Image (cartoon, rainbow, N blue to C red):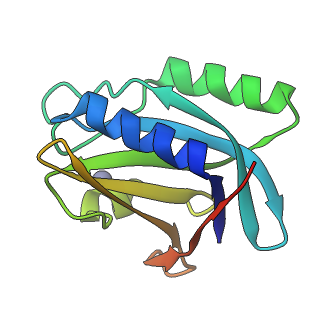
Amino acid sequence: MIVLTQEQKTAIEREARQHYPNECCGILAGHIQGRDKCIQDIYPVSNINQERSVDRYNIDPKEFLAVSKRIESLGQSLVGIYHSHPDHPDRPSEFDRGHAWEVYSYIIVGIEQGKKVSMRSFALDPNRQFQEEEIKIVKP
Ligand SMILES: [Zn+2]
């Protein structure tokens, strides 16, 4: 399970709207409690994919490094990545699966026509297949 506050969920949805029709992406920082990933901070990062930013994302490696260092300095862990799917379902693509790391959760925000949003989260199993995980919304 991945645990978010309503405010964090809204912030991710806002990112998806702002970047539409391109994909947005960002880093989820928090801590792991048993089998749950509790999100503490969200770091939007640049999608540097030039050719296919409407259906792919590549996180700027410099930003990734800077955010990783910041997360570490706060004693948090990098628990996942979010990105949007403009006018595509909120399910991981084959490209997403091929580029995913096993330790992270992947939140995907489907956004239709720049407005209607939906959100699901996935994590890889040992066979590198994505399994959906529950998103729990909590009060801060
Ligand atoms: Zn994707």
Confirm whether residue 70 shows in the render. yes
Seen from this angle, which residue lies furthest front?
139
Residue 60, how many percent across, how many down? 43, 24
- Comparing 45 with 98, the one in front is 45
Q: Is residue 84 left or right of residue 71?
A: left
Residue 116, how many percent across, how many down? 23, 53
Confirm whether residue 100 shows in the render. no
Residue 90, how many percent across, how many down? 30, 63
- Comparing 28 with 137, the one in front is 137
Q: Is residue 107 left or right of residue 65?
A: left
Q: Residue at x 52, y 49 (%)?
A: 9
Quadrant of the rendered image containing residue 32: bottom right
Task: Please tell me whether residue 95 is drawn above or below residue 56 in the rendered image.
Answer: below
Task: Please tell me whether residue 52 is drawn above or below residue 38 in the rendered image.
Answer: above
Quadrant of the rendered image containing residue 129: bottom left
Task: Please tell me whether residue 79 is drawn above or below residue 103 in the rendered image.
Answer: above
Q: Quadrant of the N terminus?
A: bottom right
Task: Please tell me whether residue 112 is drawn above or below residue 24 in the rendered image.
Answer: below
Q: Is residue 19 left or right of residue 3?
A: left
- Comparing 43 with 139, the one in front is 139
Q: In the rendered picture of this protein, how many numbered marks are placed on residues?
A: 0
Q: Residue at x 32, y 64 (%)?
A: 92
Q: Residue at x 49, y 25 (%)?
A: 61
